[in-house]
Image (cartoon, rainbow, N blue to C red):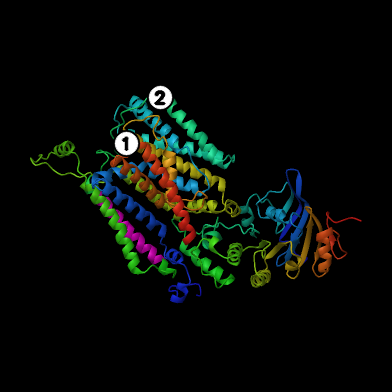
Amino acid sequence: MTEAAPAPSKAGESGRSLSDQLREIEFDPRMIGMVAALAAIWLGFNWLSDGAFLSSRNLWNLLVQTSSIAVMACGMVLVIVTRNIDLSVGSMLGFVGMVVGLIQVRLLPELWGFEHPLTWLVSLLAAIALGSAIGLFQGALIAWLAIPSFIVTLGGLLVWRGAAWWVTQGQTIAPMDSRFRPLGGGVEGAIGTTASWVIGLAICALICVAMVFARRRRVRFRFSLRPLWAEIVMAVLACGVVIATVMIANSYALPVGIARRVTEAKGLPWPPGGLFIGHGLAVPVLIALAVGVAITFLTTRLRFGRYVFAIGGNPEAAQLSGVNTRKVVMLVYGLMGALVGISACIATARLDAATNSAGALDELYVIAAAVIGGTSLAGGVGTIAGAMLGALVMQSLQSGMVLIGVDTPLQNIVVGFVLVVAVWLDGLYRKRLG
Amino acid sequence: MDMTTPLVEMRDISIAFGGIKAVDAVSVDLKAGEVVGLLGHNGAGKSTLIKILSGAYQADSGEIRVGGELVSIGSPRDAKRHGIETIYQTLALADNVDAAANIFLGRELLTPWHTLDDSTMEAETRKVMGRLNPHFRRFKEPVKALSGGQRQSVAIARAIYFNARVLIMDEPTAALGPAETKQVAELILELKRQGIGIFLISHDLHDVFDLADRVSVMKNGRVVGTARTSDVTQDEVLGMIISGKCPTGAVPGPGALRD
């Protein structure tokens, strides 16, 4: 058993770089850098805004605002990893959003009447189906006809924005179905404090179980292990973030009028001194988290994800190894489209209206989120968690600047500047540690 | 051994790219436990020919028989199904993933839940790499971080792990130093003893002559001639490569220079 090296000697250890050792225990130092950057942004804005930034209200809204971009960023990582790009996601979001609005405001009410209990579900599924279809179509052009993805999706950017206008000749559609609106957050989209605790604790339990299983597997194969203290610190940190998120969401109080209505709806008396009812986690945030977990699973645990990365690393090698690279690329675009469908629902529900300008410039924010999150435009490198953190960084900058009253043009300048600097720093880092 | 059915027979294979005949009516064959050297200048059509056998290209005409049976090889997957494994000159490794992911690329081991069984794949990789390169330790790193020899080991491991019957090695020692070249030579002899048929492609005569049982020389997409290495001298083979002149010890092919 020469291949088993459970405890490499100290002498062997010192000969390797720090990043080797970190990688050996499956620990990504880049992630720490991103979290540090996010912490700096948050503390900075908190100081500049006299504590308004880190209020539960602002953080709750920040997460809700991030959801739509974060969902699409997950798909964009896969697109960019395969050495492609998708410039059409913002326009697709606009088009799919308009169709969703049309379905639930004009089409379904005619068939089933207003406020049918299934309207929201049909709308959501239709959005995912339409998004996937558009994505697969664009993917087919890229994979089978070998048209550069930049061109196909640049065409898509124009086509789908035009199509979004065409759906209703530019008319805005509103309001949305009341069971659909929770997808966008808001008071209706907050799941309440008890449910938030249940979900939060369940996530913590899952994190711990997953870590125990991963460790057991490594023990079974005698691979090198993280020190136990590091494992425990990781578990405590991860669960701490989850619990803190739940506590913040729960400490953001419902407006008094709504709290009163909720209380009275339960048949309870409204106390004279008022009552504190927390929002709890928001539905779009939970959707984004679920998408993030699902796509992470897809990229790291399934064959499809392995192929996506192999194609990004060396398309010819993947093909010679028997991977159907065209099919994989087409499916990646299909998945991107499905996620755009979900984001279209989040955005439409949040606005409570479908407008043909929804999602304008989203493609740039989505690509920026993926790239800030460490996805390499050269292909082959990127993580879902990084992209979601990247989306959070972008949104934090933007809403922080709104909070301290920076003008819109200056906001754009700062965001553009940060994007360029972040990618430059990442490149420096890779050269030094990679 | 000459009496047995050839393991692989390629007959009258032709392929053209934009009017240029890269491979023109080429016939070669390979028997079990035999090493056949495929020689010729750069651009003689060697790599194109073996890419037809490995499924990367489809021939315009001609037929391929494996174990006497006519087969159609439309993709790399088909070739692998017939037990034909290839080590490409470029190694064809995905640089951004680790050794295990490369070795099992396209043939991943899965758990009962259809997820990647990374642990088993890594354990198997440790076994096969332990055979090829006992000092190899960098299992967690993307292969771009590895040395030329280590990358070569990964490419070889990928070819031999799946019990190949036919192994195609395209310039297997181009990126290697003398010690590693010797290691590859020993490996070839070991595989030959196991009854695997090996096509050895090289533009360097000396690499091939000691290892091969027979050589086929190509020039301008055509076979100059085929000879047992015991029947010809190195100088004569060199003459075949350079001028296309077929010596008396060799069986002339369609590409032989005619007087």
Residue A239 horizontal/vertical position (percent): 29, 57
Q: Residues within 10 Å of mark 1 (few under 14, many from 20)?
A: many
- Check the image and report above or below for B188 versus A241: below
Cα separation, mark 1 vs mark 2, equals 20 Å
The type of residue carrying mark 1 is Arg
User: In the shown orientation, is residue A18 left or right of residue B198?
Assistant: left
* Chain bearing mark 2: A
The structure residue drawn at horizontal position 38% and vertical position 65%, both measured from the top left corner, is A215
Q: Which mark is residue A350?
A: 1
The structure residue drawn at horizontal position 32% and vertical position 35%, both measured from the top left corner, is A349
Looking at the rendering, in which quadrant would you find the C terminus of chain B?
bottom right
Q: Which residue is mark 2?
A: A168
Tell me where residue B160 sits by quadrant: bottom right
Q: Which mark is residue A322?
A: none
Q: Can residue B70 be seen in the rendering of this structure?
A: no
Residue A23 horizontal/vertical position (percent): 44, 63
Q: Residue furthest top?
A: A169
Same chain check for tags 1 and 2: yes
The type of residue carrying mark 2 is Thr
User: In the shown orientation, is residue B255 left or right of residue B147?
Assistant: right
Q: Residues within 10 Å of mark 2 (few under 14, many from 20)?
A: some
Q: Which region shows up in magenta? A: A196-217
Whether the residues at callouts 1 and 2 have beta carbons within 8 Å, the answer is no
Which structural element holds mark 1?
A: helix
Who comes first in sequence, dot 1 or dot 2?
2
